Image (cartoon, rainbow, N blue to C red):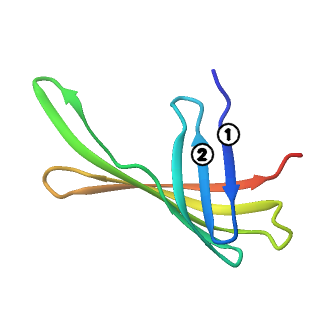
């Protein structure tokens, strides 16, 4: 099993985050930084699950927003996964992040 990781590339006003929870390939989020705050959009995916003879289609949109510490060595954030089902119902997952830079 792989370990979860978070990789960050940051410039003055842009950010790129690579995230993996260990069970999948890394996802890339791209966004902006204003002061210590950041917001980024991840990829969208379409898919389906099968239950008996029925396929249940869904679409997922991913985003994350958070804040760097004043020294820039740590962050806290909230990742949101929004699943939209064909009937318009939505399922939302929230994942809280806390990370500290390793040198």
Residue furthest top as drawn: 1
Residue furthest right as drawn: 103
- How far apart marks 1 and 2 lie (CA) works out to 8 Å
- In this view, the residue in front, 53 or 18, is 18
Q: Position of residue 58 (x, y in %)?
A: 24, 44
- Of tags 1 and 2, which is closer to the observer? 2
Residue 19 lies in what quarter of the image? top right
* In the depicted structure, whether residue 49 falls above or below residue 101: above
Dot 1 lies on which element? strand
Which residue is denoted by mark 1 in the rendering? 5
Which residue is denoted by mark 2 in the rendering? 18
* In the depicted structure, whether residue 101 falls above or below residue 12: above
Q: Residue at x 11, y 30 (%)?
A: 54
Whether label 1 touches label 2, CB < 8 Å: yes
Residue 45 lies in what quarter of the image? top left
Q: Which mark is residue 68?
A: none
Q: Position of residue 73 (x, y in %)?
A: 83, 60
Judged left or right of residue 54, residue 44 is right
Judged left or right of residue 86, residue 25 is right
Q: Quadrant of the N terminus?
A: top right
Determine crowd level at label 1: few under 14, some 14-19, many 20+ residues with C-alpha closer than 10 A.
Answer: few
- In this view, the residue in front, 14 or 100, is 14
Judged left or right of residue 43, residue 67 is right
Dot 2 lies on which element? strand
* In the depicted structure, whether residue 99 falls above or below residue 67: above
Q: Position of residue 87 (x, y in %)?
A: 13, 54
Q: Residue at x 27, y 57 (%)?
A: 90
Residue furthest left as drawn: 53
- In this view, the residue in front, 69 or 8, is 8
Q: How many marks?
A: 2
């Amino acid at each position: 099993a792989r370990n979860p990781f978070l990789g960050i590339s940051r410039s003055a006003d842009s950010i790129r985050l690579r995230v993996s929870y260990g069970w999948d390939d890394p996802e890339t989020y791209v966004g902006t930084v204003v002061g210590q705050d950041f917001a980024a959009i991840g990829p969208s995916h379409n898919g389906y699950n099968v239950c008996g003879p029925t396929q249940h289609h869904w679409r997922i949109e991913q985003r994350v927003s958070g804040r760097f510490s004043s020294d820039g060595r740590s962050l806290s954030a909230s990742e949101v996964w929004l699943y939209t089902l064909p009937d318009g119902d939505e399922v939302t997952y929230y994942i809280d992040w806390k990370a500290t830079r390793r040198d």
